[in-house]
Image (tube, helix red, strand yellow):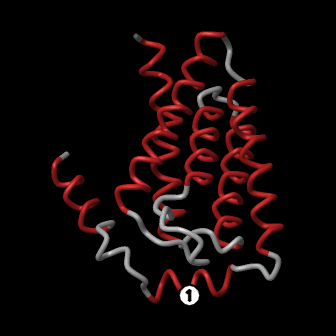
Amino acid sequence: MMKYVLLFTLLFSPQALAENAADEWVRDNAKWENTKLAGKVSDYTVVFLAASSLAVQDSWKQAGAVAGMHVGAALLNQGVKHSVARCRPDGSDCVSFYSGHTSLAFASAGAICLSENTEMCVGALVLAGGVGYLRIAANKHWGTDVLVGAGVGYACGRYVPTIIVVF
């Protein structure tokens, strides 16, 4: 476990997250001319996924666990954002790492995947991936922000609710 923490720290340290050619290339090729539209579509898609993740649960207890997971994932995201202080591609502020929209979308998709309905799981993951793309298209996040947000979000959504329900 310690080796994974060390690897994560090295890959996503402030020095490693400084502007890099790969992030710039992804941003330059994915950014929409109408960045506000990309941002709005991502906003609405995240709300849809979050609501869906609660609606598909089999019991109030599971829905409560998913709601608790959403709160915990958002708090974790904000703590990391303010600790790392990576600037956004559009220069609006320095809370880019990691993408909260993408994290919430993938957390929701992970919770939807708990229902063991393959079609819903795949659909939710596709929508969550679209949110990640749209955050880059909106010029709000770098590619690495989105990748980490997807990983952290999915892990939270898939595993945290099952741990909460057990207790």
Above or below 48: residue 39? below
Q: Nearer the viewer, residue 110 or 37?
A: 37
List x then y, in percent, for residue 47.
75, 41
Report the label total: 1
Q: Where's residue 96, x and y in %?
A: 51, 64
Q: Which residue appears at 81% of the width and 58% of the height?
A: 41
* Residue occupied by mark 1: 25
Residue 46 pos. (x, y %): 71, 46
Dot 1: element: helix
Residue 63 quadrant: top right
From this viewpoint, which residue is outermost toward the front?
93
- As displayed, is residue 96 above or below residue 78? below
For the point 59% across and 29% down, the residue is: 114
- The reply, left or right, for residue 132 in relation to residue 43 is left
Looking at the picture, how far across and down is residue 73, in whole percent?
A: 49, 38
Query: Residue at (24%, 67%) from the top-left corner?
Result: 10
Along the line of sight, the residue nearer the viewer: 119 or 45: 45
Query: How would you rate the neighbour count of disc 1 (Cα within 10 Å): few for under 14, some for 14-19, many for 20 or more?
Result: few
> Who's the residue at 52% across and 40% down the image?
74
Question: Up-down: is 25 above or below 163?
Answer: below
Quadrant of image for the N terminus? top left
Question: Which amino acid type is marked by label 1?
Answer: Trp
